[in-house]
Structure formats: C-alpha cells, structure tokens
Image (tube, rainbow, N blue to C red):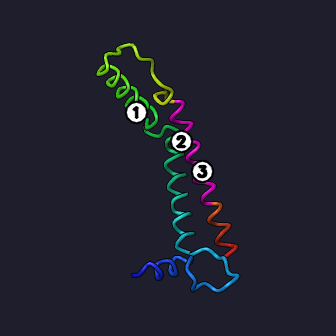
Amino acid sequence: MKLETLADHAGFGPARAAGTHAPSPVFIAVMVLGGLIAVWCGASWAFNVRGIATRRAENIRQRYQLGGAQLGQLDRSPSMWAQPWYQRLMGAFMAFAGLVMVLAGAALWHLG
C-alpha cells in the first residue's frame, strides 16, 4: 500500500469528509485491548499475584549488587526500584492507566 492509502485507511487521510472526526474502529479496538492488558498485568503486579513484584524486586536488587561488585563498590545501598512496595505501586499505576484507556476507548466508541 502507498502511504496515502494507509493514512486513509487509518482515518487520518484526506478521504474523510469535512467535519467528521470519528476515530477509526481499529484505533478504538487497539486502545481498549491495550487497556485491558494493562489492567490485567498491573493488577497482578499490584496484588503480587504469584510473587511477581517480590521476584522482580529481588532480581533488580541482585543486578544492582552485581553491578556494584563489578565497579568495586561492595556496600551499595539498594535503590528504590529494588523495593517490593515500589513494584506494587507501579503495578497500581499501570492498572489505573489501563482503566483510563478502557474508559476512553468506550467513550470514543459511543461518541463515534
């Protein structure tokens, strides 16, 4: 396909009638699907399902300590990213952002 036809297919090209600003159904579907995935992953991360946040924090802590050992710094204090509470907080933010994406996609679907 040419670039013009891709733009027309996505709903951004000159083929759209003047005054119509409805988003493409493909864009809405991708937005809602991405939001659902973010809610699922973020909630499992925030609620520490199967120890994912604890495991991730431990992996970060080990990489941080290994990097310090390679630099000759054996007494490096762990960073904030290597804490399980921080990983769970990031999961909560991810779940909230996914929920916003799903609600925005639903609003666009009803407006379009």
Ranked by sequence position, the earlier of labels 3 and 2 is 2
Residue bearing mark 3: 97
Q: Quadrant of residue 64?
A: top left
- Prevailing SS of the magenta stretch: helix
Q: How many marks?
A: 3
Residue bearing mark 1: 55
Vertical comparison of 68 with 107: above or below: above
Q: At 70% across and 82% down in the image, what residue appears?
A: 19
Residue 109 at x, y = what percent? 64, 72
Q: At 49% across and 48% down in the image, what residue appears?
A: 41
The residues colored magenta run: 85-102
Work out which residue is located at the far top of the displayed protein and give it: 75
* Quadrant in which the N terminus appears: bottom left
Residue 23 at x, y = what percent? 61, 74
Secondary structure found at label 2: helix
Work out which residue is located at the far left of the displayed protein and give it: 70
Of residues 48 and 78, the one nearer the viewer is 78
Q: Quadrant of residue 67?
A: top left
Vertical comparison of 1 with 99: above or below: below
Q: At 57% across and 36% down in the image, what residue appears?
A: 89
Q: At 54% across and 69% down in the image, what residue appears?
A: 29
Name the residue type under label 2.
Answer: Gly
Residue 52 at x, y = what percent? 43, 38
Secondary structure found at label 1: helix
Lateral position of residue 30 relative to residue 70, left or right: right
Residue bearing mark 2: 91
Crowdedness near tag 3: few (<14), some (14–19) or many (≥20) residues, C-alpha within 10 Å: some
Name the residue type under label 1.
Answer: Arg
Of residues 41 and 11, the one nearer the viewer is 11
